[in-house]
Image (cartoon, rainbow, N blue to C red):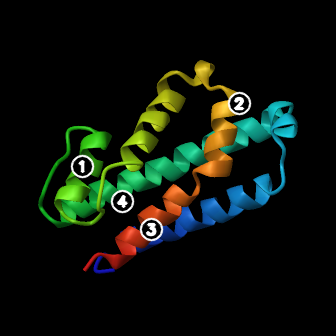
Amino acid sequence: MKYNGIIQKKTALLADYLTRLRSELNDVTFARFNSNWAMQRMTERSLQVMIEIIIDIAERVIAIENAGPAETAGRAIEKLVELKVITKPDPYVDMVRFRNLIVHRYEAIEPELLYTIATAKLSDFDSFMQELDKCD
């Protein structure tokens, strides 16, 4: 990866959050998740922070490349595609949309959605880090 310093620290933090979230949710059934308010809030906050890290990395790369600023977080992701840092905007733009939901419509977060993302979509974070790592 040609990017270092702050981006490496943020990537390491993202990897740490990912590891911890996976560990906390290992073998957790939806029934258990659905009945555990603290687990839902931990998952929600962890996902929010992880997405914020991706946005921060995108904005940092854009600044390093003198390609910004991006008007929105979604646009920052699209600029990463233009800069050939990542190959496509999805699923990362979807992450930004979910982050906006958490921040602005926090009362509407359904446990099913949290559980699905936390048990079936965490590999998207791995993919982001892998794409970033391959960047020349």
Secondary structure under the numbered disc 4 in the rendered image: helix
Q: Quadrant of residue 43?
A: top right
Q: Measured from the top left, where is residue 72 in percent x and y?
A: 26, 38
* Cα distance in 3D space between marks 1 and 3: 16 Å
Task: Mark 1 and mark 3 in contact? Answer it, CB < 8 Å.
Answer: no
* Cα distance in 3D space between marks 4 and 3: 10 Å
* Image disc number at residue 57: 4
| Mark whose residue sits in front, 1 or 4 | 1
Crowding at label 4, few (<14), some or many (≥20) Cα neighbours within 10 Å? many
* Cα distance in 3D space between marks 1 and 2: 29 Å
Q: Measured from the top left, where is residue 69 in percent x and y?
A: 17, 48
Q: Tell me the residue at 65%/37% (across/down).
A: 114
Q: Tell me the residue at 63%/50% (across/down).
A: 120
Q: Amino acid at mark 3?
A: Met
Q: Earlier in the sequence, mark 2 or mark 4?
A: 4
Q: Nearer the viewer, residue 70 or 83?
A: 83
Q: Quadrant of residue 131?
A: bottom left
Q: Residue furthest left?
A: 66
The residue that mark 2 highlights is 111
Q: Amino acid at mark 4?
A: Ile
Q: Earlier in the sequence, mark 1 or mark 3?
A: 1
The residue that mark 1 highlights is 78
Secondary structure under the numbered disc 3 in the rendered image: helix
Q: Amino acid at mark 1?
A: Glu
Task: Mark 4 and mark 3 in contact? Answer it, CB < 8 Å.
Answer: no
| Residue 67 visible within the image | yes
Which quadrant is home to the C terminus?
bottom left
Q: Tell me the residue at 46%/70% (across/down).
A: 9
* Image disc number at residue 117: none
* Cα distance in 3D space between marks 1 and 4: 13 Å
Q: Amino acid at mark 2?
A: Pro
The residue that mark 3 highlights is 129
